[in-house]
Amino acid sequence: MRCNMNLFIVDDSVLIQKKLKDTIEKNFEDINISLFNSSEELLNFIEMKIKKPDFIFLDVILPGIDGLKTCKILKKLSDLDSYIFIMTSQDTDETLEKAFKSGADDFILKPLREPEIIARLKTYIKLKNYIDKLEELNKRDFLTELYNKSQFYENLKKVVYEEDVFSVLFIDIDDFKQINDTYGHMTGDHILEELGKIIKKYENKMIVPFRYGGEEFSILIKKYDRQKAYLVAEELRKKIEDKLFYKNIKVTISGGVADNSNIDNYSDIIEIADSKLYIAKSNGKNQIVI
């Protein structure tokens, strides 16, 4: 089974660590496994934020902080959404009740049985993939498949603190109301969908496009000042101008570009980009202003 996830094993027995690691690597591709001998090692590693675990196999009996207490600590971490499997040799109702009360998602009985490990992990990998897809869908606009407005603000707030240089581009479809009035809103939706596909092709680690609302889009461009961002925007403008959209309708866009030079907070760059967009509209449309 192929997946791309991180799995942590916490057990003070080298034999248990090896058996689990060998079983998982034999049956699953692309699972990155990290081994820890104690809860303290695990918690220190998580605190460093080097790698975020998707799954944690956690023994109950450990030197120092035991597994149940560790589970409670992990579940209180707001940025950690790992599935935790408690490992125990005590097959009693009391032990299992304590495990679930501590926040464990499931349990693995010792001695370890390979079919049980495989079956439980497969189930949770499918569950995690399903939840991840739902969360991703919730972040995107259903019509254009671009990230939505709330994601724009969330990403912008991050880059303000994380990036030395970045730019924001606001673009708006010219005379879109006229298109809707002439051809109908269904045609308008087709055009939005087609335009979204063009913009989405630019999406990568540095360039993140969003549907801001209605016929307006925003693009966050990391590590580019406004001059470099202008080149991206102008290329996009020309592509849209040269394309025949649904029902052979010609579409143009206007845009405004701003970068983070001389701004105090994220709202400043929005105001600047929006004001540049207004100038582009006022100066005849179908142009980018920086």
Image: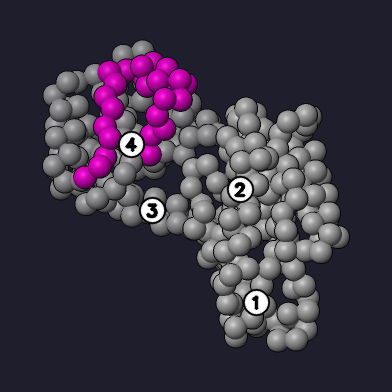
Pair 2/4: label in front: 2
| Separation of marks 2 and 1 at Cα, in angstroms | 22 Å
Residue at label 3?
129
Image-quadrant location for residue 44:
top left
Pair 2/3: label in front: 2
| Residue 171 percent across, percent down from the top left | 70, 57
Q: Secondary structure at mark 2?
A: helix
Q: Secondary structure at mark 1?
A: loop
| Separation of marks 4 and 1 at Cα, in angstroms | 48 Å
Q: Amino acid at mark 1?
A: Lys
**Which tag, 3 or 4, sits closer to the chain's start?**
4
**Which tag, 4 or 1, sits closer to the chain's start?**
4
Q: Amino acid at mark 3?
A: Asn
Image-quadrant location for residue 216:
bottom right
Residue at label 1?
250
**Which tag, 1 or 3, sits closer to the chain's start?**
3
Q: Which mark is residue 6?
A: 4
Q: Residues within 10 Å of mark 4 (few under 14, many from 20)?
A: some
- Stretch of the chain drawn in magenta: 29-55
Q: Residues within 10 Å of mark 3 (few under 14, many from 20)?
A: few
Image-quadrant location for residue 14:
top left
Q: Is residue 72 magenta?
A: no
Q: Quadrant of the image for the C terminus?
A: top right
| Separation of marks 1 and 3 at Cα, in angstroms | 40 Å
